[in-house]
Image: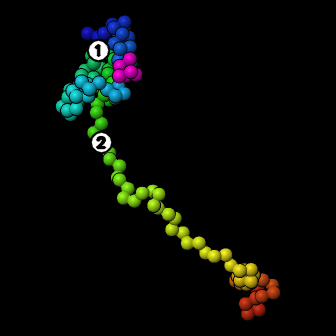
């Protein structure tokens, strides 16, 4: 006993209006009924019945409406920060800038360490 095409389109239109306008948030009556896992199983069984016997279009829209109307089970509570964000300061240590004489010495020592295998300075007279 399948639904006629006109009936399918009317029911699909009503379900589409419900999905678009009434599922954010779902009505309290529907949420109250679907709060129980047993009620959710019965509703899903009804969707399967409608899909197998009546109309796949109506069953699809019923399933979407059902999923959007089921209340959330997760209760996420963000952790409260013990310290305020304003109290947090960067822990970086700032090194003082070197004096010009020290800077020259450090750059020369870096050059010697980096380029010790040049033609002028070799280890034991060997280039490599």
Give the colour scheme of this rendering: rainbow
> Disc 2 and disc 1: Cα gap in Å?
34 Å
Question: Which mark is in front, 2 or 1?
Answer: 2
Please tell me which residue lies in front, 32 or 99. Answer: 99
Please tell me which residue lies in front, 119 or 115. Answer: 115
Which residue lies under the disc numbered 1?
A: 54
For residue 24, what is the image quadrant? top left
Magenta stretch encompasses residue 20 = yes
- x%, y% of residue 121? 77, 88
At 40% from the left and 22% from the top, the residue drawn is: 20
Residue bounds of the magenta highlight: 17-22
At 30% from the left and 36% from the top, the residue drawn is: 72
Please tell me which residue lies in front, 49 or 84. Answer: 84
At 68% from the left and 78% from the top, the residue drawn is: 98
**In the displayed structure, does residue 128 sit left or right of residue 39?**
right
Which quadrant is home to the C terminus? bottom right
Q: Earlier in the sequence, mark 2 or mark 1?
A: 1
Magenta stretch encompasses residue 57 = no
Q: Secondary structure at mark 1?
A: helix
What is the count of numbered marks?
2
At 35% from the left and 49% from the top, the residue drawn is: 78
Whether residue 48 can be seen here: no
Which residue lies under the disc numbered 2?
A: 74
């Amino acid at each position: 006993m399948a639904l006629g095409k006109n009936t399918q389109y009317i029911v699909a239109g009503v379900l589409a209006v419900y999905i678009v306008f009434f599922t954010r948030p779902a009505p309290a009556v529907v949420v109250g009924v679907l709060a129980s896992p047993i009620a959710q199983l019965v509703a899903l069984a009804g969707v399967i019945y409608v899909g197998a016997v009546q109309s796949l279009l109506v069953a699809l829209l019923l399933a979407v409406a059902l999923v959007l109307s089921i209340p959330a089970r997760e209760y996420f509570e963000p952790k409260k920060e013990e310290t305020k964000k304003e109290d947090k300061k960067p822990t970086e240590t700032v090194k003082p800038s070197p004096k010009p004489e020290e800077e020259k010495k450090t750059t020369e020592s870096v050059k010697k360490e980096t380029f010790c295998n040049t033609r002028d300075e070799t280890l034991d007279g060997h280039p490599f």
